[in-house]
Amino acid sequence: MNNIRKNRLKDQAFKVWGIACTLLGLVLLLIFLGNIFMDGIQRINWSFLINLPSRSPEKAGIYTALMGSLWVLSLTTIIALPVGIAAAIYLEEYAKKNKLSSLLEVNISNLAGVPSIIYGLLGLEVFVRIMEMGGSVLAGSFTLALLILPIVIVSTREAIKAVPKSIRDASFAMGASKWQTVYLQVLPASFGGILTGIILALSRAVGETAPLIVIGALAYVPFAPLSPMDQFSVLPIQIFNWITRPQPGFVENAAAAIIILLLITFVMNGIAVYFRNKWQKKLK
Amino acid sequence: MRRIKEFVIEKLLLSSALITIAVTIGIILVLSIEAFYFFSEVSILDFLTDTEWTPLFTNKHFGIMPLLSGTLLTTFIAIAFAVPVGLSISIYLSEYAPKSFRKTIKPLLELLAAVPTVVYGFFALMVVTPYLQGIIPGLSGFNALSAGLVMGVMIIPYISSLSEDALHAVPYSLREASYGMGSTRLQNSFKVIVPAASSGIIVSIILAISRAIGETMIVAIAAGQQPRLTFDPTVPVETITAYIVQVSLGDVQHGSLEYRTIFAAGITLFVFTFLLNTLSHKMRKKFQEKYE
């Protein structure tokens, strides 16, 4: 009897431990957010959003960084979206099971694991130096587009895979060609899933710092970019810059800018989850 | 006409897929060409055995060991924290927790991985380090400990989510058999389910290690910029990634030896993560075959 009780006790003990571990992560996240919120919230006002960077922390704002992030995000989407979706369609609908397709698959999963800073080195050499784009919005967008490409491909494939075969069969039976089936049936049916993946990929791109530092995005830019060839900064780099300054006023600024960045990230994640739930219901 | 259109479209789609191969080739070419120039000026033996890394000083030394020790130290701290916690979470969620609880908690945990790393860096430097300084006297403002711990928090969901998937994939009949023999949930978890899902769990840990080695902003902000060959977690160190950031922030001439050092550092980083990723991919293939 004693042994059974001991085992039951151990069982209960692990249950308590498991709950504690699960909550630990979430509690830490709450402490993180609470701390940053307390540090930064009084600094957030309209002028913080529309002011240019400045040497004095009270006057500094995030306007140029915010516009830079917006520029980079839009161009990254334009570059990565068509390529990523096309590659996913090829792998899911066209590719035969051969050496090439398994090579593509291994390669994509490997690319997804390459550290982001390595993409920065690639962008520095190829886009900044060889293609002579300099540390421009365009060079940054190409770099981030390559970075999120594997994520877009993987999530688009998942979405396409979820479309039932019966839809394709029906389309072929009506005399549709392969591309007509893909374009008119499979893509619309998987739209929600594709959208989810893309928003998640972009929410990753908006927080990326290291590759953009490597390609030479600046910490201090006096004006918001007006064209793809302009120099730029982004929100995470602005935050990084403020964190590394010794004056306490800048710490407050960094916390305030973090609140804005987290707001953007969490809203994007929320939208993605919303679309996923809606789409999964529809598919059923 | 229609056949030509279909043909062209297929080739266009194929070429998009081939871009991913071009990216890999691009990465390897860029890293190895610049590293080749680097090694034509610095002997590879010095690179691997010199215990000092001071390319930006007048007295230049090019030993990768200090950067490597910084990288391994922060990674080790992160993994030592994240593996027990992440595994406990995954076992609890898979074997103990009610289904509804699991469904709500998993996306919340994954939020940990969605937070931009520069935010974690801020937290490590501004909150965790001052707090730890209260406990450990003599802890310097930049140190491997708080950077490693915060990195551990960030990678918890990588381990908990993937391991939970692996545990969940274990066929139900194994649980029925084990419960039928009168085992408790704990005995069932550790003697039956965890061993059955071990390859999936190992994959999750390998991916987490690879993620921690490549992590940049947390260590660049909180671990310091002083390359030194040490495994003392209380002093400033520099990781490979932090060094690349440090050089990129400065004004380094293209084509100079300093410029090439970041590619030499980069190729070291790439080799490590590439080996780990390939290993995890191989193991995942094996683990998928087992249950299909």
Image: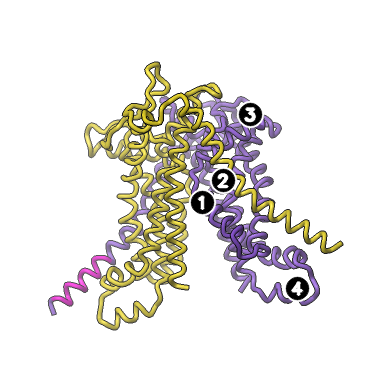
Chain colours: A purple, B yellow
Helix, strand or loop at disc 1?
helix
Task: Return the disc, 4 or 3, that comes first in the chain's sequence.
Answer: 3
| Residue B217 in sight in this render | no
Dot 3: chain letter: A
Dot 1: chain letter: A
Helix, strand or loop at disc 2?
helix
Front residue of this view, candidates B154 and B229: B229
Front residue of this view, candidates B223 and A110: A110
**What residue range appears in magenta?**
A3-14
User: What secondary structure prevails in the magenta region?
Assistant: helix
Q: Amino acid at mark 2?
A: Thr
Q: How far is disc 4 from disc 3 in space, using C-alphas?
A: 48 Å
Dot 4: chain letter: A
Residue assigned mark 3:
A134
Q: Are discs 2 and 1 less than 8 Å apart at CB? A: yes
Task: Return the disc, 1 or 3, that comes first in the chain's sequence.
Answer: 1
Q: Are discs 1 and 3 less than 8 Å apart at CB? A: no
The circle drawn on residue B166 is none
Q: Is residue A9 magenta?
A: yes
The circle drawn on residue A171 is 4
Helix, strand or loop at disc 3?
loop
Q: Quadrant of residue B26?
A: top right
Q: How far is disc 2 from disc 1 in space, using C-alphas?
A: 9 Å
> Could you tell me which residue is drawn at 43 percent across and 41 percent down?
A36
Q: Is residue A179 above or below residue B221?
A: below
Mark 2, Cα crowd under 10 Å, few <14 / some 14-19 / many 20+, is some
Q: Amino acid at mark 4?
A: Ser
The answer as to whether the residues below labels 1 and 3 share one chain is yes
Q: How far is disc 4 from disc 1 in space, using C-alphas?
A: 35 Å
Q: Amino acid at mark 1?
A: Asn
Residue assigned mark 1:
A110
